[in-house]
Image (tube, rainbow, N blue to C red):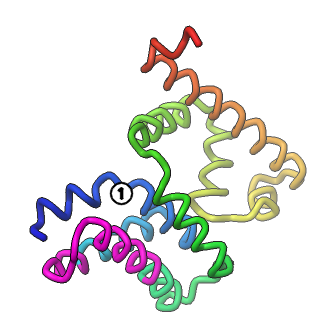
Amino acid sequence: MDRTEILKVLMPERTKQIALAWSILRQSDLSEDAYQDMLTLVFQNHDSFEGPQHLRDWSWKVLRNRCYELIRQRKYQVALLDESILNLVDAELEHRDTTDMSLRADALHECLDRLSENARQTIRMRYFEGLRGNRVAEKLGRKPEAVYKALQRIYVTLAQCIQKKMAALDPGDSFS
């Protein structure tokens, strides 16, 4: 397969694959690095793919293995899921419809920008820095229960905001 064919197959998988990497590494920059490393290996092995499905399957396995390798190299302490659970997650992500994934990601970014500074700081610590709720509470000088309740409110706010933005993009859906 040539570079153009490879990109046509893998670009629709990009968001799902980076999501998988993030679910393992819990760091956005490392997830992107793992994805780029996987693409490099794909391009180096471009002659060995028997077709689009073989390329997809191979890329998912290479990406997951690269994530584990990054963990071992940097001695990160992340809680890995059991292999059978990871296989289920892989299967779900591979079959999920991603036609509106980039629109949802854009909506999420816009909705995150609309949050208060305190809410953004809580989200940043929890998901971008990978801190557990107790550690977030400690850094913010709050009780863990307050942080968990705040996160729950933030989730609801983000979900509603994203839903409104997506509905606004699809006016035909508002009559159902």
In this view, 141 is above or below 73: above
Residue 21: x and y, percent? 48, 68
Residue 50: x and y, percent? 21, 76
Magenta residue check for 70: no
**Dominant secondary structure of the magenta stretch?**
helix
Magenta residue check for 48: yes
Q: Residue 29 versus residue 7: which sits nearer the camera?
A: 7
Query: Disc 1 marks which residue?
Result: 14
Report the magenta residues as a range.
Answer: 41-65
Instruction: Using residue 108 as the reference point, say whether residue 145 is left or right of it.
Output: right
Which amino acid does the dot numbered 1 rest on?
Arg
Q: Quadrant of residue 39?
A: bottom left
Q: How many marks?
A: 1
Instruction: Using residue 175 as the reference point, say whether residue 170 is left or right of it.
Output: left
Residue 48: x and y, percent? 19, 83
In this view, 12 is above or below 105: below
In this view, 149 is above or below 165: below
